[in-house]
């Protein structure tokens, strides 16, 4: 305290001090790291290699060093650019790259109309429901069937349910299956090009009429072919 002209004047001894650059609490760091990793995957899925490497380097710095509030403020300042990236995110491209890798876009295995889609459906020849693990393309018997991508024929066999069928192993652990064929023109272990004929549409096995049953598998797990094939308008 200090006296001045008979009036009491209070003089504060408190002086503002800068806050220490403390690290983020654990929960905040985990949330931020998860968000940053998401953007790494996002950027790698649609950006050039240089951009993806920049994102990877950013996460590496975050892992090797403490993240401070100032760092977060700087990162938030770039949010408009990040939001713009998310707005232009191509989910279909992201999914396709995850399944079939960086190779060229798939082509349709044959001409015709898709009459049954991937998913749960009523059994065509019995009561109840079952998971349809591919798509059925109705076409005239004898219609040419081609490989949707280059690969190696891993199986040519006769199945009670699938009839005469061919399986092709492609890259990135992805394979394709062609069933209910009428004829086959390839052999096991044969290399096949995209668009090369492998057989014809038939009605072998458990089929109610001529059609191609087509499947795509990733590491042995069936995925919906319609999410990977080009729009129908491109093959009509």
Image (spheres, grey):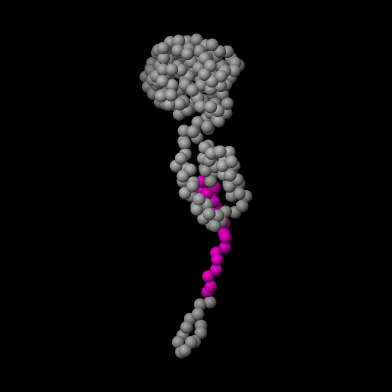
Is 115 in front, or is 55? 55
Q: Position of residue 196 (x, y in %)?
A: 53, 16
Is 12 in front, or is 127? 12
Q: Residue at x 60, y 16 (%)?
A: 189
Q: Position of residue 132 (x, y in %)?
A: 43, 23
Q: Position of residue 198 (x, y in %)?
A: 52, 14
Quarter holding residue 51: top right
Left/right of residue 55 with respect to residue 213 in the rendered view: right
Q: Residue at x 46, y 26 (%)?
A: 229
Residue pushed farthest right? 64
Picture quarter with the C terminus: top left
Q: Is residue 105 visible?
A: yes
Q: Position of residue 217 (x, y in %)?
A: 51, 25
- In the image, the segment drawn in magenta is 14-35
Whether 63 is drawn above or below 149: the answer is: below
Q: State yes or no: residue 219 in magenta.
A: no
Q: State yes or no: residue 27 in magenta.
A: yes
Whether 41 is drawn above or below 222: the answer is: below
């Amino acid at each position: 305290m200090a006296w001045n002209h008979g009036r009491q004047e209070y003089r504060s001894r408190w002086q503002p001090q800068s806050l220490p650059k403390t690290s983020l609490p654990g929960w905040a760091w985990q949330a931020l790291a998860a968000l940053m990793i998401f953007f790494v995957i996002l950027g790698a899925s649609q950006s050039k290699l240089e951009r993806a490497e920049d994102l990877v380097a950013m996460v590496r710095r975050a892992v090797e060093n403490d993240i401070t509030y100032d760092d977060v403020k700087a990162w938030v300042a770039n949010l408009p650019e990040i939001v713009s990236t998310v707005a232009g995110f191509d989910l279909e491209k992201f999914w396709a790259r995850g399944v079939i890798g960086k190779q060229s876009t798939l082509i349709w295995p044959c001409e015709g109309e898709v009459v049954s889609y991937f998913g749960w459906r009523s059994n065509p020849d019995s009561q109840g429901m079952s998971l349809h693990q591919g798509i059925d393309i109705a076409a005239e018997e004898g219609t040419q069937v081609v490989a949707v991508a280059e690969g190696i024929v891993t199986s040519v066999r006769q199945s009670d349910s699938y009839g005469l069928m061919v399986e092709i192993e492609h890259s990135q652990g992805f394979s394709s299956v062609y069933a209910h064929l009428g004829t086959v023109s390839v052999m096991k272990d044969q290399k096949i090009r995209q668009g090369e004929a492998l057989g014809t549409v038939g009605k072998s096995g458990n089929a109610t009429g001529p059609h191609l049953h087509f499947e795509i598998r990733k590491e042995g797990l069936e995925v919906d072919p319609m999410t990977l094939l080009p729009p129908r308008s491109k093959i009509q």
